[in-house]
């Protein structure tokens, strides 16, 4: 069970199940999304995910030439959970408020296209491209 929110507090959510460990994506699209070297996310079943408030504040952008979408708060711009596939949500680990204490980074994906200054210093497994657990 975990809860999370955006920076302005307008959007809040909870996950009522276990999640995957953290996957950190280092691809150039996720880098622009976050302004950072990678985005750490956990995956949870859709049926265990619930918006608690602010659903109307959520914007999303679908990249036309790629299987990629960004979800964000239209007030404060914080990255928000989004649809990973038909049955799963991805949750940006940085948006988790409570319940994330035991999470660790298990997988780094798209390491083959990471930024030159991005040095990976933890024990997460590194994958050149994508990886399905
Ligand atoms: Zn917000
Ligand atoms: Zn990515």
Image (cartoon, rainbow, N blue to C red):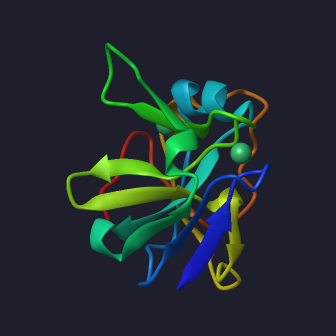
From the top left corner, tell me how far across and down residue 98 is, in percent. Answer: 70, 79
Q: Is residue 11 left or right of residue 110?
A: right
State the residue at coordinates (44%, 73%): 20
State the residue at coordinates (68%, 28%): 115
From the top left corner, tell me how far across and down residue 1 is, in percent. Answer: 52, 86
From the top left corner, tell me how far across and down residue 112 is, in percent. Answer: 50, 33
Q: Is residue 92 above or below residue 78?
A: below
Q: Nearer the viewer, residue 94 or 113?
A: 94
Q: Is residue 115 above or below residue 47?
A: above
- Quarter in which the C terminus is drawn: bottom left
Q: Is residue 20 left or right of residue 2?
A: left
Q: Nearer the viewer, residue 117 or 73?
A: 73
Q: Nearer the viewer, residue 95 or 55?
A: 55
From the top left corner, tell me how far across and down residue 35 is, in percent. Answer: 74, 30
State the residue at coordinates (79%, 49%): 8
Tell which residue pokes out farthest to the left in this image. 86
Q: Quadrant of residue 12?
A: bottom right
Q: Is residue 21 above or below residue 70?
A: below
State the residue at coordinates (41%, 84%): 17
The quadrant where ligand 1 appears is top right
Tell which residue pokes out farthest to the top in this image. 65
Q: Nearer the viewer, residue 117 or 28?
A: 28
């Amino acid at each position: 069970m975990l809860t999370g929110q955006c920076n302005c507090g307008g959007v809040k959510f909870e996950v009522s199940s276990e999640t995957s460990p953290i996957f950190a994506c280092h691809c150039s699209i996720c880098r622009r999304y976050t302004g950072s070297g990678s985005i750490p996310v956990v995956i949870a079943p859709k049926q265990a995910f619930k918006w608690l408030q602010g659903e109307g504040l959520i914007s999303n952008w679908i990249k036309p030439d790629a299987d990629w979408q960004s979800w964000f708060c239209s007030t404060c711009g914080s990255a928000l959970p989004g649809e990973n596939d038909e049955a799963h949500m991805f949750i940006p680990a940085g948006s988790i408020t409570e319940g994330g204490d035991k999470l660790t980074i298990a997988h780094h994906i798209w390491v083959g296209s990471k930024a030159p200054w991005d040095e990976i210093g933890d024990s997460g497994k590194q994958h050149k491209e994508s990886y399905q657990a």
